[in-house]
Image (cartoon, coloured by chain):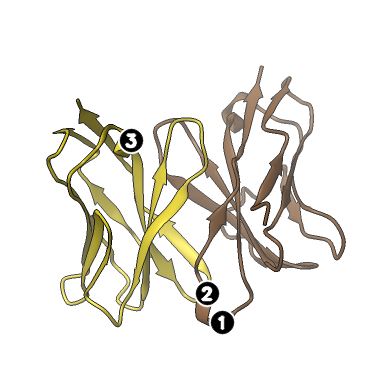
Amino acid sequence: GENVEQHPSTLSVQEGDSAVIKCTYSDSASNYFPWYKQELGKRPQLIIDIRSNVGEKKDQRIAVTLNKTAKHFSLHITETQPEDSAVYFCAASIGDYKLSFGAGTTVTVRA
Amino acid sequence: NAGVMQNPRHLVRRRGQEARLRCSPMKGHSHVYWYRQLPEEGLKFMVYLQKENIIDESGMPKERFSAEFPKEGPSILRIQQVVRGDSAAYFCASSPPDRLAKNIQYFGAGTRLSVL
């Protein structure tokens, strides 16, 4: 089955700096890659996603890049703010409906 | 749109009791997924259901766990004879029937089950 690996497991950045989280996947048939943000005790929230027909997608301070050949995708957060502190999960699609999630990255933005 | 609704938010059970977790998908969504999340871990897929059908239960433990999504009412995840190892957050997600929106999943706030 699909195996998604996510790195790093923890990330501490100074406010205003950039944060990058990387994920790799194993199933070459995966074609949908969402990112979720989960604040402590709250629901995972979809923040950005990308399908395999594009290489990059941007939404304000958040961007995702996808390299299908290498089977990896990354989340980039620029100009980080304290409210960006959360756990971030990447995921890759399995077939038409399932998602396989990475283990998560705990991001801490230092003021 | 109220989003995906889960209840209860917190559930405490003693070993051997039954736990029933409920999930109402977003309006217009016909696909429901259940996930389990242990502390400081990722989301583990348990089961995928459509109305009156279990499509994929490959992530469900073979014993004590069951799920349903009846024609009327919420989806139910049922855990019989709970053990301490069942303590976790259980999240429900839903997705629309739109073929173009497949795989897109929206999560509820979760039910945190504590087994004493």
Q: Chain of mark 3?
A: A
Q: Chain of mark 1?
A: B
Residue type, numbered disc 2: Lys
Whole-angstrom CA distance, mark 2 to mark 3, is 30 Å
Q: Are marks 2 and 1 in contact (CB under 8 Å)?
A: yes
CA neighbours of label 3 inside 10 A, class few (<14), some (14 to 19), many (20+): few
Q: Is residue B109 above or below residue B33?
A: above
Q: Quadrant of residue B29?
A: bottom right
* Residue nearest the observer in this picture, A79 or B57: A79
Residue B63 lies left or right of residue B43; in this view the side is: right
Which chain is displayed in brown in the rendered image?
B
Q: Chain of mark 2?
A: B
**In the rendered view of the protein, which quadrant contains the N terminus of chain B?**
bottom right
Q: Quadrant of residue A10?
A: top left
Residue type, numbered disc 3: Glu
Residue name at image x 31 percent, y 78 percent: A52
Residue A103 seen in render: no
Q: Is residue A25 above or below residue A88?
A: below
Whole-angstrom CA distance, mark 2 to mark 1, is 5 Å
Residue name at image x 84 percent, y 56 percent: B73
Classify mark 2: helix, strand or loop: loop
Residue matched to label 2: B102
Q: Are marks 2 and 3 in contact (CB under 8 Å)?
A: no
Residue matched to label 1: B99
User: Horizontal and vertical percent for residue A53?
Assistant: 30, 82
Residue matched to label 3: A83
Drawn colour of chain A? yellow
